[in-house]
């Protein structure tokens, strides 16, 4: 067993990282090891999983055995020499970056390496980027930076050029299915469905395989194309989609919000977090603002996932229309896919797909979600 | 000096409203009964040694000097920057010139109390002008002000009218006073100022909100909508609120328009998100709209929202283009 077992279908990256771990263990580290790494790969390919595994392997005396305390704590994010940075906000601020640089300059306390895992490196603000440059280029001897981003283009060239690049690819459907069966004990049929429906997104596949609610939500989203036949139904479908995403976003953040509020109250010695006294109100206000931001992003993420599902539907329609010999993502909806496919020309399907991509971009750019989705459903109705 | 005058060598005016302080000053000048008064305004903060003495000395050709010293509340002992000014004022107060008028204006607060006490000892008269309250009391205060202002002409207005006037003009006393004078001079003295007149005069300015713009454009009045847009933007309504309001109004209109003809107002209201009383109006509006028209109008709003949020183009242009597109969509069959 090895910590790298959690990487799904990434043979090349795995070989590279294993070599680096071996070289890192030498008394004078070999060429396969370096001090700054950039993990890129499409969402769900396991960037942060790979980075965590690499971090664990570096701090583990056995090169990532997967069962010693060092491996465990590193994977969980509580190892003394591994700093995890992930954000739930839209950006990572320059203040946060500066504090990281400070942490990066301290020597490791138990092992040989201090590892800083910076997930969402694409969310660094420009000034945060600049704050990191010096430390990325010449960190102290025992510090290793692990950055994660969707693609090379998502980080500044100055960051890119200072890192060694590890490229992860979208795992194949069979890789994902096998992983679900072996690691999560999902039965084969469900694993096959989840792997197919998630289009190689491991976390999403796991969610679909385990959670019935997730499957129902997905089915509801995919029923949208059949329901947008008129102006009224297009607007109502848009509202339903956005409302459901908002609800899920709130649901996802609710329990954390509550814990944070109670903790803040305890820290400040406030008895009732619902009605803080005057002197503590600004603290609670600040917390609430941060939570609102996080909820907003959770909603946007949910909505984006819905739109990806919709995109997969039209992709299938297109596959049927052009007689492509690749498996359908939504094979269980073959009947309604074929119905839509027979009604329109491939050009119109392409236009629908473009409209979906357009809506995704807009929502990511903070356009009012409901308006963006309405524009989309109106476009889908017309086609 | 040939004519004997009732000049007051020392006066203290307290208050924080420039207009009221000005009026108090005018009253002071009028009571002096001298039309040859030379007004000098000095700031208490920047007084130079000897400046008060020079300004209050009678000149060969000029009349009685009236020296206004503004901002006496800034003369606090603990601030070394104003030590020289403080000395200057205190020195003058110990020996004021009986042939000059000096007015100390104190804007409220605890600063400069020493100066006020010294002034009183030197025999200063005090004129207190009302200070403006903050928060909710301000509007009440302004309503009273407008009432007395109008009564002075005389002219009358009911509280509702006064409310509308304040909404339109704002809460600055000078603006309100100017508006009252303007309205009365056009209407004639002794009349009753009604709400309708105020709305006619300040029509474009009464609380323009995103929804007012949406209402106009939905009814096909593009020019009015554009006018209101300009005004709303001038008065600080954010661009995103305009797109949000237009989006919501169009959404309601579209859902009302596509609801079954005979459906009860309550269920249509629930479906469309419009308040029940508005459903009837929306139904009437919907007669001028077709489904393709509504669809392209909503798309135009979504495009404008994107333009505004991403900063792709100038927000004024994006909004104007949106209003024109929505207005045109109304005629679309």
Image (cartoon, coloured by chain):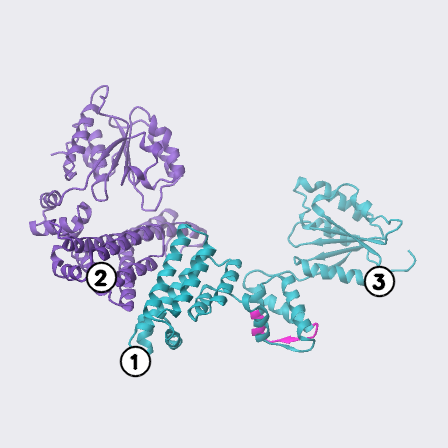
* Residue receiving disc 3: B33
* Residue receiving disc 2: A224
User: Which structural element holds mark 3?
Assistant: loop
* Residue at the (60%, 76%) spot, across then down: B194
Q: Left or right: A65 with respect to A29?
A: left
Categorize mark 1 by other alpha carbons within 10 Å: few (<14), some (14-19), many (20+). few
* Residue receiving disc 1: B262
Q: Chain of mark 3?
A: B
Label 3 with label 1: CB-CB less than 8 Å? no
For the record, the magenta segment spans B152-164
The chain drawn cyan is chain what? B
Q: Residue A342 occupies which quadrant of the picture? A: bottom left
Q: Which quarter of the rendering shows the C terminus of chain B? A: bottom left
Which of the numbered marks, if any, corresponds to residue B161?
A: none
Residue A118: image location, x then y, percent: 30, 37
Q: Chain of mark 2?
A: A
Q: CA distance from mark 3 to mark 1?
A: 79 Å
* Residue at the (12%, 55%) spot, across then down: A331
Q: Observer-nearest residue: B59 or B312?
A: B312
């Amino acid at each position: 067993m090895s910590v790298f077992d959690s990487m799904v279908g990434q043979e090349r990256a795995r070989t590279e990282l294993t070599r680096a771990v071996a070289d890192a263990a030498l008394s004078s580290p070999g060429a396969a090891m370096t001090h700054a790494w950039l993990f890129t790969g499409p969402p769900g390919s396991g960037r942060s999983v790979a980075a965590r595994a690499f971090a664990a392997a570096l701090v583990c005396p056995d090169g990532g055995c997967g069962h010693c305390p060092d491996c465990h704590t590193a994977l969980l994010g509580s190892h003394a020499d591994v700093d995890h940075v992930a954000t739930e906000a839209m950006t990572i601020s320059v203040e946060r970056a500066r504090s990281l640089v400070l942490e990066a300059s301290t020597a490791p306390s138990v092992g040989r390496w201090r590892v800083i895992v910076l997930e969402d490196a694409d969310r660094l603000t420009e000034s945060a980027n600049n704050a990191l440059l010096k430390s990325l280029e010449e960190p102290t001897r025992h510090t290793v930076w692990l950055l994660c981003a969707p693609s090379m283009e998502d980080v500044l060239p100055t960051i890119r050029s200072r890192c060694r690049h590890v490229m992860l690819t979208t795992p194949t459907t069979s890789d994902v299915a096998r992983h679900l069966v072996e690691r999560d004990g999902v039965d084969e049929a469900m694993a096959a469905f989840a792997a197919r429906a998630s289009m190689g997104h491991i976390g999403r596949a796991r969610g679909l395989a385990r959670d019935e609610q997730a499957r129902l939500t997905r089915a509801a989203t995919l029923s949208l194309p059949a329901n947008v036949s008129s102006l009224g139904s297009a607007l109502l479908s848009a509202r339903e989609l956005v409302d459901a995403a908002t609800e899920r976003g709130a649901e996802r953040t609710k329990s954390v919000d509550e814990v944070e509020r109670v903790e803040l109250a305890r820290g400040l010695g406030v008895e009732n977090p619902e009605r803080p006294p005057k002197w503590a109100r600004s603290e609670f206000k600040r917390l609430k603002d941060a939570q609102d931001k996080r909820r907003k992003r959770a909603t946007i993420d949910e909505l984006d996932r819905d739109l990806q599902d919709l995109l997969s539907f039209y992709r299938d329609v297109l596959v049927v229309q052009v007689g492509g010999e690749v498996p359908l993502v939504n094979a269980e909806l073959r009947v309604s896919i074929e119905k839509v496919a027979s009604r329109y020309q491939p050009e119109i399907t392409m236009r629908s797909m473009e409209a979906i991509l357009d809506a995704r971009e807009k929502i990511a750019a903070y356009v009012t979600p409901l308006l963006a989705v309405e524009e989309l459903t109106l476009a889908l109705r017309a086609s | 000096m040939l004519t004997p005058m009732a000049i007051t060598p020392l006066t203290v005016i307290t208050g924080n409203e420039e207009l009221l302080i000005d009026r108090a000053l005018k009253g002071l000048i009028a009571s002096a009964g001298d039309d040859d008064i030379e007004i000098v305004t000095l700031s208490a903060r920047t007084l130079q040694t000897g400046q008060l003495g020079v300004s209050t000395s009678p000149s060969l050709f000029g009349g009685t000097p009236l020296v206004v010293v503004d901002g006496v509340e800034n003369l606090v002992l603990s601030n070394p920057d104003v030590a020289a000014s403080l000395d200057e004022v205190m020195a003058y107060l110990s020996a004021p010139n009986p042939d000059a008028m000096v007015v100390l204006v104190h804007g409220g607060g605890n600063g400069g109390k020493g100066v006020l006490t010294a002034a009183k000892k030197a025999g200063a008269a005090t004129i207190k002008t009302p200070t403006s309250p903050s928060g909710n009391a301000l509007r009440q205060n302004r309503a009273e002000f407008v009432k007395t202002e109008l009564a002075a002409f005389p002219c009358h207005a009911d509280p509702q009218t006064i409310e509308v006037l304040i909404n339109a003009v704002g809460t600055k006393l000078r603006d309100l006073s100017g508006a009252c004078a303007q309205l009365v001079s056009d209407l004639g003295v002794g009349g009753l100022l009604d709400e309708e007149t105020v709305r006619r005069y300040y029509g474009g300015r009464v609380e323009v909100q995103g929804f007012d713009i949406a209402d106009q454009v939905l009814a096909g009045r593009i020019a009015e909508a554009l006018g209101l847009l300009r005004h709303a933007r001038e008065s600080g309504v954010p661009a995103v609120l305009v797109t949000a309001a237009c989006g919501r109004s169009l959404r309601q209109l579209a859902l009302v328009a596509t609801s079954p003809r005979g459906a009860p107002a309550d269920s249509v209201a629930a479906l469309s998100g419009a308040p029940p009383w508005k459903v009837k109006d929306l139904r009437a509006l919907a007669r001028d709209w077709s489904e393709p028209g509504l669809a392209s109008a909503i798309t135009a709003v979504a495009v404008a929202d994107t333009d505004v949020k991403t900063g792709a183009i100038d927000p004024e242009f994006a909004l104007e283009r949106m209003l024109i597109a929505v207005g045109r969509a109304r005629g679309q069959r």
